Amino acid sequence: MSLLRVVPIVEGHGEVAAVPLLIRRICGELFGAYEIEVLQPLRQPRSRIVLPGNLQRYTEIAANKLRAAQPRGEGLVLVLIDGDGDLPCVLGPALLAGALAGCGDQAAACVVANLEFETWFVAAAASLRAELRIAEHDIPDAPEASRLRKKWIEDRFCGIRYSETLDQPRLTARMDLALCRSRSPSFDKLCRELERALLSVRSRSAFRGEG
């Protein structure tokens, strides 16, 4: 079975730990694919990632990491940042153009979390009752449309204080992926990009006659 290798490019310290876990969970739990290796993410501030010309350099570094780990075959450079005030449908394609320019023979995908990574926790809030103080009527059906961000999580967090570095990985490990996908179009975009990468790897494997 061929292995999918992914190098994420992220903006936050919490996402350095959370995003590899999220990728492995999505591939395994939603698509039954456990032949995944997520290499150490590259972290850069969002302001640098979105600056024209910068992303091409970062994706070149990520693509070289993939080539070093997997001389034969294609990996995936996954750019994942918060939308903040930008529309994913505008920012995403602009980022992808820079990513493709830097990746060469490696695949690239750009996912913009609308509005923040924590918005995905809001989408999965019903599965995080052990972490959040929430009533049934408090759970939103469409957190992106309601413009709900990290503050929604902070206001309901059961701990002393929500910490991105400590709590993003923990909530990522516990969130219901299918529920999040059903309530967050940008999370669904991430799932579709990973599914596409998995199908590409499996297609190449079948073409080469690998088991």
Image (tube, helix red, strand yellow):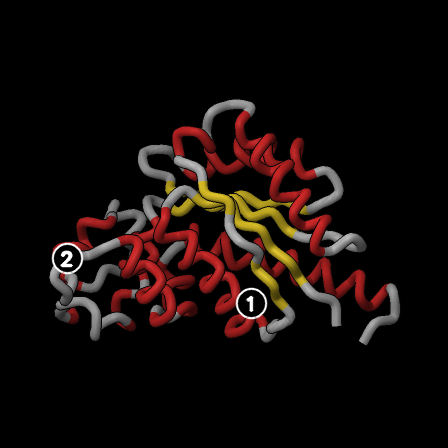
Query: Where residue 35 appears, x then y in whole percent?
Result: 64, 70
Query: Farthest front residue?
Result: 68
Query: Where residue 25 appears, x then y in whole percent?
Result: 49, 69
Give the residue type at disc 2: Arg
Residue 182 sits in quarter: bottom left
Mark 1 lies on residue = 27
Q: Quadrant of the C terminus?
A: bottom right
Query: Where residue 43 appears, x then y in whole percent?
Result: 45, 43
The 10 Å Cα crowd at callout 2, few under 14, some 14 to 19, many 20 or more, is: few
Going by the image, does 154 lie left or right of 15? Answer: left
Q: Residue at x 15, y 65 (%)?
A: 159
- Mark 1 lies on a secondary structure that is helix
Mark 2 lies on residue = 161
Q: Residue at x 78, y 54 (%)?
A: 73
100 up-or-down from 138: above or below:
above
Q: Nearer the viewer, mark 1 or mark 2?
A: 2
Query: Where residue 145 appears, x then y in whole percent?
Result: 29, 47
Front residue of this view, candidates 138 and 117: 117
- Mark 2 lies on a secondary structure that is loop
Q: Earlier in the sequence, mark 1 or mark 2?
A: 1
